[in-house]
Image (cartoon, rainbow, N blue to C red):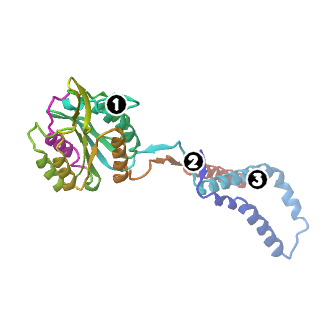
Amino acid sequence: MYEFVWWWMFILVPLPLMVRFLWRAVERQTGVALRVPFLQDFLQADSQQNKRWSKWILGLGLAAWLALVTAAARPLWIGEEVNLPVSGRDLMMVVDLSGSMQEQDFVINNQQVDRLTALKFLADDFIKKRAGDRIGLVLFADQAYLQSPLTFDRTTVRTLLDESAIGLAGERTAIGDAVGLAFKHLLDSPQQNRVVILFTDGANTAGTVTPMESTEMAEKAGLKIYTVGIGSENESVRSMFGFQLMNPGAEIDEKLLRTMASRTGGQYFRARNTEEFQRIYQELDRLEPVEKEAETWRPQQELFRWPLALAVLLGLVAFLLRTEAEST
């Protein structure tokens, strides 16, 4: 659409007519005392000849003035709204794909599902809400892999997480390597906006970097780590000897996860069931809120050059016509 920034400039449009009216009034007041009886005869001699020129000159002059006022009003062309990425947090999700993540101790829609499926199901909505954040994804088991670098494309991150599978990176748990890899890809981010969320259901059993080494590096760099221990407690399981009380989440090294979180200014959470898992995502949203809502921008293009050029052209033509009229 088109818009005039200084629309009030259009009040100047009748200015030439006002000047012409006032000029005539002054001429009548200061007219010459001597009247020549036959002056009208001299004027009639060339009035027919110049009448045609004066109409063109007057019309061109008024058109030039209107174009000049239009240029002074600063016309703008405003385009369609464009969504802008906004500066938020750089959030790296670190997800455990070790063999123990296939333990089916979560329930979604009245169906028993494994830990990774529950994580994916609830993380989908969490990622969807993080408008303005750059999100990355690290998957790990025996080794750690960067599945997605930091990006504003939340749809791609959700797809890549959904496509991950247990055993894809091995069977054991390299927590230190995974956090170290996430730390490496967050080094260039602003210190106050760097966040790692670690999801695991076990203890560190593989890798070349210990969890405490990666935690010390994160602590020195001002990187915040949130840790989530996944697994239920005291589950009653039917066996050939009757019902037995088992603890599927006993392998979680809660002491380590608490230490990693507390030393970096984060927090440790325990997800024993689907409801707790969902509340953890809600709490993460509260602790690390989105910086600001998505912004939009309309491209603008200044158009004053065109009416200004038209005013100059019309003024030049009017000047040439007047010169021609005077010479004849």
Task: State the separation of the CA atoms marked 1 and 2.
Answer: 49 Å
Q: Is residue 23 visible?
A: yes
Closest to the observer, 259 or 223: 259
How many numbered discs?
Answer: 3
State the SS at label 2: helix
Image vertical order of residue 192 relative to residue 282, above or below: below
User: Which residue carries the number 3 mark?
Assistant: 54
Residue at 70% across / 58% down in the picture? 13
Closer to the N terminus: mark 2 or mark 3? 3
Identify which amino acid the numbered label 1 is placed on: Thr
Picture coordinates of residue 173, whole percent (x, y): 15, 36
State the SS at label 1: helix
Identify which amino acid the numbered label 2 is placed on: Trp
Tell me: 14 left or right of 74.
right
Closest to the observer, 81 or 217: 217
Tell me: 9 left or right of 51.
left
Residue at 19% across / 29% down in the picture? 99
Task: State the separation of the CA atoms marked 2 and 3.
Answer: 26 Å
Image vertical order of residue 237 relative to residue 212, above or below: above
Question: Residue lying furthest top in this view?
Answer: 240
Queried whether the magenta region covers residue 182, the answer comes back as yes
Q: CB of mark 3 within 8 Å of CB of mark 1?
A: no
State the SS at label 3: helix
Q: Which quadrant, please, contains the N terminus? A: top right
Tell me: 227 left or right of 306.
left
Q: Which mark is residue 159?
A: 1
Q: Which mark is residue 306?
A: 2
Question: Residue lying furthest front in this view?
Answer: 242
Task: Give the crowd class for mark 3: few <14, some 14-19, many >=20 residues within 10 Å.
Answer: some
Which region of the structure is painted magenta?
168-188
Residue at 45% across / 43% down in the picture? 83
Residue at 60% across / 50% down in the picture? 3
